[in-house]
Structure formats: C-alpha cells, structure tokens
Amino acid sequence: MPASTPLPRTLDAWLKQLDGQVLPIAADHHQQVRRALGDSRRSLRDIADLMQDSPALVLSVLREANSKGSALGEAAESLETALTRLGLKRAEELLARLPARALADIPLPLRQIQLISQHAAYQANGLFAARLARLWQEIHWGSLLFLSPVWVLLAAHPHLFDAWEQRVLIKGEPPVRVERDLLGVSLFELCLALAERWRLPAWITQGYRLLIDDRRLLGKALYLARRHDEPLRQQQELDADPALQRWLTQPANSILLANVIAVSAHNAWSGIHTRRWHGLTSLYLQLPPAELQQQIHQNAAHSARQVDTSGLWHPAEALLWPWSARHFQTPKPVAAAPVSDWRQLCTQLLAQPSAFSNVQQLTMCARQAVQAAGLPRLVMLLADRTHSRLQVQQHAGVAASASGLTLDPAQSQVLRRLLQKPAQLRLTPANVAQFSALLPGDLKALLPSEHLLLRSLASNERVVMLLFADQGGQPISDTTVQAFTKTTQCIERALDTFSKRKR
C-alpha cells in the first residue's frame, strides 16, 4: 500500500491537495453509464437519471462542466445542464479517466458519506420539492452535492470519518475542536472554499456561509423553533424580527435542513441534535412536529429501499429499534487481563533462544503483551533501514484502515525524535497541545486521545519500531505506565534475541 498522504494544516494546503482528488466509481455502474453514453437511443434525461445513482460521478461531471476551461461563464447547477454543456463525447472521455473500482475496493467511509448525501436528497425531495415544485432541480442537486467537499476529503483520508464518529458521536467532543485538531482548519470553511472553487450550485455556498457567518441568526431560529407548543408566541416573535422571518422563507435553506436531518439521524432519531433540527424544519414548513416527523421517517424508509446499502449503515434500520436506542454507544471499560496472562506473554518474549520464527509472530506476541498490560488500543509501526518510512505492523482497537498504513517520518518532528534513539513520551492534557501538532494527522485520527503513550523500540541500540498505545482515550494510571515500560523492555529484549537467532 502506498504511503499515506500527509494531512495538510492550512486552508491553502488542503485546497491544493483536494481540488484534484479523483473519486472512484463502482465498476458495475461505471460500465452501465459507459454503455448508455454510447447508445444513440438514450436521451440526456435518461443518462442523467442513470448517473445520479453514483454521487461521485455526478460531482465529477459538474466539476468538469464548471471548470475554468468551460466556454460559458455561468455555472451549471444541474446534471442535465452539465451534460448538455460537456456533450456526450467529453462525458465519455471524463468517464474513461475516472477509476472503476469493485465495491469492496472503495473506502467504506467514502461510501457511507455518499449514502448520507443520498439520504439527504430523499429528505429534500420528500419535504420540500413538492411544495416548491418549480425549484425541484435546485433542491435535488443542491441537497445531493451539499456534502460533496467531504467526499473528496474522505477519498484522500478515509480514517477521518472513524475519528469523527469516535470523538463527536461517541465521546461528545465539540465538533469545532475535533475539526481543528484533525484538519487544522474549520471543516465548513474548507467545504465553502472547495464549493466555490468547483462552482457548485449557489445554494450550497449560501448554506456554508450561513453556518460560518450567520450562526447567531441560526441560533435564534433554533431557539424559537423549540417553542412549537406556543404557536401564537412563536408568531409574535417572528413578527418582531423581520430578518429572521425573511430567512425562514428562503428556499435555499431547504438543502441545509435536509442534510442536517440526514447527518443527525446517522446516530439516533431521538438525539438532541435531531430533535432540534426537526423543530427548525417544522417551523420552516409550518407543519406540526408530529406530522413532520412522520414524513421524515417515511422519506428515510424510501431512501433505504432505493439506494445500495451493502455493508453500510442506514438510519432507517433504527426505526425498528426502541426509541431511545443509539447507533453508536459509549464503549464499556475493557476488563483488565489477569496478571498471569501478562507474565506468560513477557516470559515468551524473554525466552532464550527466541521463541519466534518471524517478525510477525514476535510483534503479535508484543501486541498481546501490551494489551494485557492494560492498554487495549495500540498501533505498532515498523521502521525501514533508512528510517524514511514507517509501516503499521500490528494494531488493536483502532479502525481497520490502520492495516497497511504507512507514514513519512520527515513530516513529523516527534517521529523523527523517537527514531533517533530509544525514548518514551507520555501525553496528558497538560502537554498534549505542545506535541499534538507535531504528530501525523493519520496517527491522531487512529488514536484520538489526550492520554497517550509513545515509545521507540530498539534492537542492538538502533530504533526499529515505534509503539503508540492508550486506554481508549481514558486517563492512564502510573501503575499502567510502569507495566507498559516493563512490557516494552521485554519487547526490546525479544528483538535483540531474535536478531541473533541461527538462520
């Protein structure tokens, strides 16, 4: 697997990396569209209907049509307009450049975020398109593409989705802090910048500007929506605030509401954020909350029947669960392994001659020993001879995307220091800000924690591995730190013995 692309930390760097990011297309759909483009009996409407089953293809066509090389100055805001502008020949050439991948080879987080976008489009069509029939194209394509800047982000760095779920949905950390920690910039500002660069539909950029610049207005609307059981007072407050009343009549808000409904439902239908946005949508549509909720649930069920959910989570499934259920649960503390297990594993590491016939066996035993010492979540990286590349050798308790991940030590001052000589670093809330910015974003996404142990492991006085471990983000006691230190000493002894084995 190629080395993971380093995470930028500035808006300009992110734009440079993501602007040209290519999105993979499912191979079966790629072939269907290719055949349709070559079929003279197919109308543009037929081809557009077929294409919209692949959100990545829709975005690629609009980006191509709205590129700077376009002969027309006005941006295309629908797929049919974009196809008309490109022509079938250029559309075929574009499709040929897009990678066709088996479904299993497309990163799961990318497919999941595209499913959320498809769910949002179904919510928008069901809630708003019938009421604003003359604007149905703006509503449909705007709601589908609203999160498209996040698609390219996850195509480049799929592990960021797991980190967001863990920190925001499970641990309840403030999204703004998580975004700054993982990306170095505001996610909404990044999305707005990409939407403007790609010349996406105007309602999309308007929605992001609202989230960035008009949060006070949005807050007032959300607060007023909570008073759904006092319609007279609600109307009186609206009459007294013309700016808010005007905002509540803007059709462009429909695509933002549809996307927030889809994103909040990703965790729970009864969560506080879901109820808050349902309330605002109820106020926007002037519908009783119960009637609106019924429509939203029907739209979700319709979406789940229509889109491909293979291996993905669709919130319509949770409509069958108890109302208080959550898709994501706070993990229960991992029970500590018996001390006898840890001693047995350390004895195996210290055996003379080496008990291992290859590095995989040794590192697997080392991983088990670290877990038995009370650290269930870890990443172990193997260094190459020149210390120019680190590759994940073992991992536990982190996203599956860790498998095969490679890092460039040149991108991280902390990694370079750890590779120079054997050392151990303990991160705590008191010093995490000092070191966090110096760690690779990929690594922080796998181990989002303010309590982390870092250790370089040497063989014959030369660092050969780096080890990162924690207790699922919980504080690490001094006793556990001592057990970790003893375990790593055993691992180093095992590495020395293994290097001197008879071949």
Image (cartoon, rainbow, N blue to C red):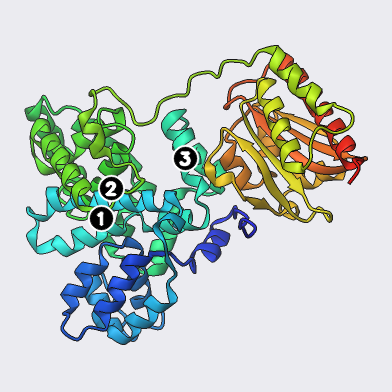
Callout 1 touching callout 2 (CB < 8 Å): yes
Callout 2 touching callout 3 (CB < 8 Å): no
Neighbor class of circle 1 (other Cα within 10 Å; few <14, some 14-19, many 20+) is many
Q: Name the residue rendered at 8%, 35% in the picture.
A: 291
Give the quarter of the figure containing the N terminus: bottom right
- The residue where tag 1 is placed is 143
At mark 3, the secondary structure is helix
Residue closest to the eye, 98 or 59: 98
- The residue where tag 3 is placed is 164
Q: Which mark is residue 173?
A: none
- The residue under label 2 is which amino acid type? Asn
451 above or below 33?
above
- The residue where tag 2 is placed is 259
Residue closest to the eye, 44 or 253: 44
Q: Name the residue rendered at 81%, 53% in the picture.
A: 387
Task: Determine the image quadrant of residue 453.
Answer: top right
Where's residue 75, x and y in %?
30, 74
57 above or below 459?
below
- The residue under label 1 is which amino acid type? Ser
At mark 2, the secondary structure is helix
Q: CA distance from mark 1 to mark 2?
A: 7 Å
- The residue under label 3 is which amino acid type? Trp
Where's residue 12, x and y in %?
55, 61
Q: Name the residue rendered at 15%, 33% in the picture.
A: 237
Neighbor class of circle 3 (other Cα within 10 Å; few <14, some 14-19, many 20+) is some
180 above or below 61?
above
